[in-house]
Amino acid sequence: MTDQPDLTVNAFTAEEPPPMKVAAHLAFGPGNSRIPEDVQGEWRRIYRAAFDEAAKNRCGDHDPMTPHQVARCKANEQVLRVRHPRTYEEAMALPEWQLLRRRVRTTVETVFDGATKTNTEVITHELCGITIDGKRFCFPVPEKTTAASN
């Protein structure tokens, strides 16, 4: 006996023999523990329903996607899709589990003013990030936020 947890879920309802085990780590293994349990449960529920549907609609061995692949794609599209932020406020409101990365990037640029023959430093702050579905975003940090953090 090992101390390893059982990482499988039943992919069929109890009325459909034989029950088939589907590895739960298809989407959520120990490395993805930052995804909330309720989101994981919703993903598994949609996965089971999509798997059953895909298994019924499969067109023989020449079908390019297995029922497991179809079910995983449907569950990922419905549960793990992140609404792409359109503003700084929307980007800050995204929950941490939906982000691979979020940080403020500071850029210092020296601008030469030909009229006064002086250099001026222009400092800009941008909030940049990447969501779990690979979408990138970058928004200027509002001045009031920048002033409050100084």
Image (cartoon, rainbow, N blue to C red):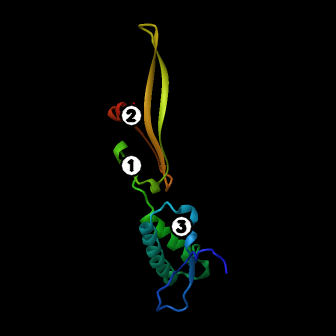
The residue lying at 41 percent from left, 54 percent from top is: 95
Look at the numbered discs 1 and 2 and tell me whether their residues touch, using CB distance below 8 Å: no
The residue tagged 1 is 85
The residue lying at 52 percent from left, 63 percent from top is: 33
Count neighbours of disc 3 (C-alpha within 10 A) and say few if under 14, some if 14 to 19, many if 20 or more: some
Q: Which of the pair 134/100 is nearer the observer? A: 100
Q: Which amino acid lies under the numbered mark 3 shown in the image of this protein?
A: Phe
Name which of mark 3 and mark 2 comes first in the sequence. 3
**Which numbered disc covers residue 130?**
none
The residue tagged 3 is 28
Q: Is residue 95 above or below residue 18?
A: above
x, y percent for residue 18: 55, 91
Q: Which amino acid lies under the numbered mark 2 shown in the image of this protein?
A: Ser
The residue tagged 2 is 149
* Secondary-structure class at tag 2: helix
Question: In terms of image quadrants, where is residue 120?
Answer: top left
x, y percent for residue 127: 43, 40
Marks 3 and 1 sit apart, C-alpha to C-alpha, by: 25 Å
Q: Give the label, 1 or 2, closer to the camera.
A: 2
Q: Is residue 89 left or right of residue 68?
A: left
Q: Is residue 115 left or right of residue 34?
A: left
Q: Is residue 25 above or below residue 13?
A: above
Where is the C terminus found, in terms of image quarters? top left
Q: Which amino acid lies under the numbered mark 1 shown in the image of this protein?
A: Pro
Name which of mark 3 and mark 1 comes first in the sequence. 3
* Secondary-structure class at tag 3: loop
From this viewpoint, which residue is outermost toward the left? 144
Q: Give the label, 3 or 1, closer to the camera.
A: 3
Count neighbours of disc 1 (C-alpha within 10 A) and say few if under 14, some if 14 to 19, many if 20 or more: some
Q: Is residue 35 left or right of residue 63?
A: left
Where is the N terminus found, in terms of image quarters? bottom right
